[in-house]
Image: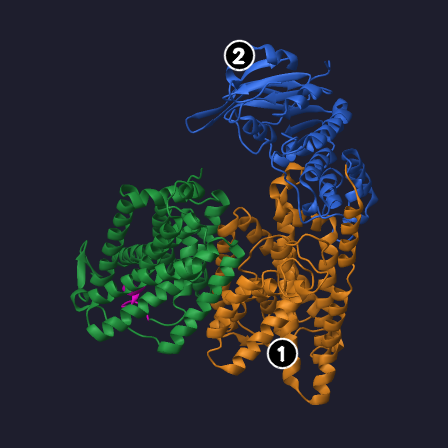
Chain colours: A green, B blue, C orange
Amino acid sequence: MSFDLLLTQILNGLQFGLLLFLMAAGLTLVFGIMSFINLAHGSLYMVGAYFAAVTFAHTDSFVLSVVVAVVALFVLGFILDRLGFSTLHKRDHLDQVLATFGVLLFANEAMRIIFGSTPLYMDTPAALSQPVQILGFNYPAYRGAIIVAGLLVALGLHILIDRTRVGMLIRAGASNRSMVSALGVNIGWLNSFIFALGAALAGLAGAMVGPILSIQPGMGEPILILTLVVIVIGGIGSIRGALFGALIVGIVDTLGRGVLPSLLFLVLDPATAAAAGPALASAGVYVLMAAVLAFKPEGLFPVKHT
Amino acid sequence: MSTDAPLLALHGLVKRYGGLLVTDDVSLAIGRGEVHAIIGPNGAGKTTLINQIVGEVRSDQGRIELGGSDVTRWPVHARARAGLGRSYQITSIIPEFSVLENVLLAVQSVRGHNFRFWSPATALPQLVEPAEACLQLVGLLGLRDRSAGLLAYGQQRQLELAMTLAIEPKVLLLDEPMAGLGPAETQEMIDALQAIKDRHAILLVEHDMHAVFSLASVCSVLVYGRIVFQGNPSDVKGSSVVRDAYLGDEELP
Amino acid sequence: MTSGATETATAKAETAVGASRAPAIAAIVLLAIGVAVPLYSAIADDSYTVALVSRMLVFALAAVGLNIALGFGGMVSFGHAMYMGFGAYAVLLLGTAGIVNGWLQLAILFAVVAVIAVVVGWIALRTQGIAFIMITLAFAQLFFFVFVSLKAYGGDEGMSLAQVSGFGPLTGNRIALYYSLLAALVVAVYGAHRLVGSRFGLVLRATRINERRVKAVGTPPLPYRLAAYVLSALVCALAGFFLANLTGFVSPAYLAWPVSGELIVMVVLGGVGTVVGPVVGAVGLLLLEEILKAITEHWMALFGPLIVVIVLVLRRGLWSMLPGTHGDDEKGTRS
C-alpha cells in the first residue's frame, strides 16, 4: 500500500466522517434534548438528496441545489415536528421507534412512487471536478470541498451552541429538560427549531452526497445506522461527541474497507482472506462500538446531566 | 441503649454536588433496638444521606459500615442482601402486581435463587408464608390479591413497609414513612413500627414530630447537610441551635 | 385498617374479570384453526393458504420469543431478526458442512446462539433507553453484513438449501414440518405462560416496571435481563430454523433490520407483555400485509402510516381487547 493511497483513504475517511457528523449532530441533539428517537432521520437525508437532484436537473446550479435542499428540509422538519412528531415526544421510546419506523417505510415508498426505483445521479459541479494538489498528490476537489464544508458547519455549530442565546437554551435543554421549560421558554417552538436544524443538516448531507453516491429509495438507512453508531460512541446529546465519534467512525470504516482486506492477504491464505476481508471490513465499526461500550457505556464525550 | 456493636455506622460522610456541600461530615451509629430519627428543614440533605447509605449515591468521603462490614463501595442490591432495608419517601411499589406479588418479590430476593421458570411464585409456600406474615404485620393480609395500584395511598405506604420488612433486614432506613398519611393512618404506622423496633436498628427520617417522639431514642438534627445536634428527642425542643435552624421552617410541638 | 362492603365488592368484581373464559376460548379457537389449515388446504387443493399460515406460525414463534425480552423484560431490541437469521443459516451452513441431522443442527445452533446472545446482550445491557435500541440495531447490521459477505453461501442474494434438516423418516415431510412448527409454537406460548408467573418472571417484570425497587430488595437486575434476552434469542433462532426448512431458501434478507422492526410491531400490535398477544400480532400483521399487497404494489405507502396508527391508537394491543386479558401495562390479573 503506497503512502499516497493511504493518505487518500484517510482523507476519504475524514470526508465520510464529516458527512456522518452532519447527520449525527442533528440526531444527537434531538435525542439528547427531546429524548426523541427518530428513525426517519435517514429519510430526511434521502429527501434532501432528491430535492438537490431535482433542483440540479432543472437549474444546473449546484449551489442552488444545496440551498434548496437545506431550506426545504428545515421547513419540512419544522412542519413535521409541529404537526406530528411533537406528540411522539411524550411517548415512550418503543412508540417512537415504531412510529418513526412507519414514517421511514412510507417515505421510501413515497420516493419510489414519485421517482421510481431507478437511481438518480448528480454530476459533480464543474468547478470542483478537477483534482487538487494536497501534500504533493491529487485528491478529488469535490471531496475536499465536503471536508471544508463539514468543518465550516462544525465551526458554525460550535458558535451557535456556545456563543448564542439559542445555543445556551439548547445546552441547558440537553442537561436539564424540565428546568428549561420551567423557566418559561416555549419549549415547543425550541424543540421544533432544534428538530428543523437537524433536518436541515441531514438535508445538507444528502445534497452534498449527490455527486458521490446514487440517489435512490432506501439510501438513508445505511447512513442512519452508522449515524446511530456514531452517537452511541460519541455520547448521546453531545455535539463534540458527534464530531469526534463521526471522525473516528468515518476513518475506521473507510480504512477498514480499504486497508484491511489487503492486510489480511499478508497474514492469511488468499481464500480465507478473500472471504473474511469484506466481512471484517464492514464489521470493523461495530466491533469498535462494542469495544467502546464495554468500557464506557455512556460514550466517549458524554453530556453531564443534572 | 443497646450494648451490642452498632448494626449501622456512618463515619464522616461527605457529599458534594459541584460546589454545593450536601452532606457535611455526618457520623452516627445505631444499634439493635434503637430508633434514630433524623429531622431537619427541607433541603437539609436527608434523602441524599439515605441515598448514600443505601448505595444509590456514592459518597465523596467517609465510610459506611453495616453489621461490621465496610459496605461503602458495595452496590445497592448487595447492601440489601446484607440486611439493609429501605422504604421510599415517594411510594415505590409495583402497581401492576398484586399486593402479595409485591411482597413475594422481596421475599424471594433473600430466599434461594430466582432462576426458576416454571412454578408460579404465588403457589410456593416457602415464599408465600413469609410474605403473608409481613402483610399481616402491616394489616394488609385481607387485600393480598388486590392489584397494588388500586390501593389507597395509606395502604400503599403500608405495602411499602411490608416490602422493606420482607427482606428480613437488620437495619431499616425509613424515609418519611408517614408522608401524606392522615392522623389515624399515622398512628397505625407508628403502632406497626413500635411492634417491630426491638428487632431492628432503625434510621427514621421524619417531619412528623409526634412519630419522632413516640419512636425515637436518639434524634439528630440535620441542617445544610451537617448534624448540628444529636441527643435525646426531648432535648431537641430546648436546643437553641435547633431553634435557630428551624425558625420559620418547622413547627416544634 | 378500614375494610367494608365496598372493598369486598370490588375484590369480587376483579376476580370475576380475572376468571373470564374469553382468553382461553380464544386461544383454543386459534389453535383449532391452526390444526385445521393443512387439512383444508389438502381438501381445497390450495397450497397458498398453508404457505401463508406457515409463515404466520414462524413469525408468531419469533414474536413470542421477542416478547420475552421486550414485553416482559422491557428490552426494546431492534435486532432480533439476526437470531432468526442464525437459525436459518444454521441449516445451510451445517448442512453444507455435512451435519445434516436436524437434532444435531439444533443443538449446535442453540449452543452458538446462546454464546452470541450472552455477549451481545451483555454489551447492550451496559446501556439503556435509546442507546440500547441503537446498539441492538447495530449488532444486527453487523451480522447482516457478515452473512452478505459469505459469497460461498449466496452472498446478498441468498441460496437454496441443498437439503433440509434430517429428521429420520420424517425428513422432507411437509405435514410433519407444519405440525411440529405448530407444536413448537404451542409449547412456546405455554412456556411463556408459566414463565410469567414464575419466580424468574416476577423478577423480570418487576425490573421493567421499577428497577430501583428491585435492587432495593436485594436483586441485581442484570442476570435476569440477560437470561431473558438469551432465552428470547433462542426462541427466535428456532423460528429461523423452521423458516429455512419451510422455504428451502436462506438469505441475508432474513436479518434485514426492517424484519426486526416488523417483529416489534407484531408484539406491540398483539399486546406487549401478554402471553398470546404476540401470536395475534404476527397473524394480524402478516394478514394486513397480504391485504395491502393485493390492493397496490406500493403497499408500503399504506403499511407505514398504518403502523403509525397502530402505535398511536391501539395502545394495549389486539389481545388486550378481550375481557380478562391484561399485559403489565394494566392493573389487574394477567393472562
Residue A193 percent across, percent down from the top left: 34, 53
Quadrant of residue A22 within the rendered picture = bottom left
On-image quarter of the C terminus of chain A: top left
Q: What number is the disc on residue B241? A: 2
The stretch in magenta equals: A205-214
Q: Nearer the viewer, residue B138 or A285?
A: B138
Return the residue at label 1.
C52
The chain that hosts pointer 2 is B
Would you say A126 lies left or right of B159 here? left
Residue A211 painted magenta: yes
| In front: label 2 or label 1 | 2
Give SS at disc 1.
helix
Residue B114 percent across, percent down from the top left: 72, 45
Mark 2 on the same chain as mark 1: no
Q: Nearer the viewer, residue C159 or B46?
A: B46
Residue C130 percent across, percent down from the top left: 49, 52
Where B239 sits versus C172, above or below? above
Asked whether the residues under the numbered discs 2 and 1 touch, taking CB atoms below 8 Å apart as contact, a structural biologist would say: no
Which amino acid, by three-letter code, is at mark 2? Val
- Graded by Cα atoms within 10 Å as few (under 14), some (14 to 19) or many (20 or more), the crowding at tag 1 reads some
Q: Which residue is at 69% across, 61% downward?
A: C275
Which amino acid, by three-letter code, is at mark 1? Leu
Would you say C122 lies left or right of A126 here? right
**Would residue A266 be seen by someone viewing this image from the given angle?**
no
On-image quarter of the N terminus of chain A: bottom left
Q: Which residue is at 49% across, 54% downward?
A: C135
